[in-house]
Image (cartoon, grey):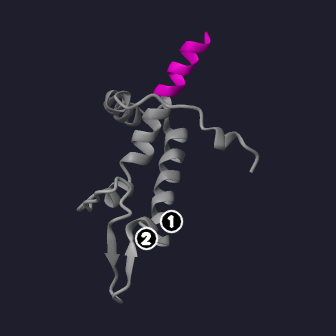
C-alpha cells in the first residue's frame, strides 16, 4: 500500500471513529442549548453569573463539571471497547456504514504533534 492510500484510509477511519465514538455522545448534551453572543470573537466579553451572584468571564468558566466529564469519558471508552470487540458484528457494520458519509464531509485530519511528545 502506498503512503497516499494509507493516509486516506487512516483519515476515513479517524473521522468515522470520531463520529461514532465521540460526536454522538454526552458531548452533544453540552453542545445543546443557547450559545451566548460575543462581539470579540473569543467570548471574552461574555459574563456568567452563578447562583451566588459571582460574575465570571465565559472564557474562565468550566463548561464541564467533573461528573459530566467522567460520564462522557466512560461513554467514549465503552464505545471504543465495543467497536474493537464487535467490529465484525453485522449490526455495528450497518451503523458504521450509515455514518461514514457524514463523517467523510469533515475536514481531513492532521498529525497531532502533541500526542507524539513524551509525556
Q: Disc 2 to disc 1, how far (Cα)?
A: 18 Å
Q: Decide whether residue 81 is among the magenta residues.
A: no
Occupied quadrant, residue 93: top left
Segment colored magenta: 1-12
Question: How many numbered marks, from 0 up?
Answer: 2
Quarter of the figure with the N terminus? top right
Q: Judging from the image, what secondary structure is the residue with disc 2 in? A: loop
Q: Earlier in the sequence, mark 2 or mark 1?
A: 2
Question: Residue 53, how many percent across, how many down?
Answer: 33, 88
Question: Callout 2: 10 Å neighbours few (<14), some, many (20+)?
Answer: few
Front-lying residue, 109 or 22? 109
Question: Residue 78, how many percent across, how many down?
Answer: 50, 52
* Residue name at image x 46 percent, y 69 percent: 60
* Residue name at image x 65 percent, y 43 percent: 114
Q: Find disc 1 in the rendering and name its residue.
A: 70
Front-lying residue, 59 or 69? 59
Q: Decide whether residue 8 is among the magenta residues.
A: yes
> Which numbered tag is attached to residue 61?
2
Any part of residue 1 in sight: no
Front-lying residue, 92 or 69? 69
Q: Is residue 6 left or right of residue 88?
A: right
- Taken as a whole, is the magenta stretch helix, strand or loop? helix
* Residue name at image x 26 percent, y 62 percent: 36
Front-lying residue, 42 or 113? 42
* Residue name at image x 41 percent, y 66 percent: 63
Q: Residue furthest top?
A: 2
> Which numbered tag is attached to residue 62?
none
Any part of residue 53 in sight: yes
Amino acid at each position: 500500500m502506498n503512503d497516499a492510500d494509507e493516509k486516506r484510509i487512516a483519515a476515513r477511519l479517524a473521522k468515522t471513529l470520531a463520529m461514532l465514538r465521540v460526536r454522538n455522545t454526552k458531548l452533544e448534551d453540552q453542545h445543546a442549548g443557547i450559545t451566548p453572543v460575543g462581539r470579540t470573537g473569543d467570548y471574552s466579553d461574555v459574563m456568567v453569573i452563578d447562583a451566588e451572584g459571582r460574575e465570571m468571564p465565559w472564557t474562565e468558566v468550566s463548561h464541564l463539571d467533573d461528573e459530566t466529564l467522567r460520564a462522557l469519558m466512560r461513554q467514549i471508552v465503552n464505545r471504543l471497547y465495543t467497536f474493537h470487540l464487535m467490529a465484525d458484528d453485522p449490526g455495528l457494520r450497518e451503523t458504521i456504514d450509515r455514518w461514514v458519509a457524514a463523517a467523510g464531509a469533515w475536514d481531513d485530519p492532521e498529525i497531532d504533534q502533541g500526542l507524539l511528545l513524551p509525556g
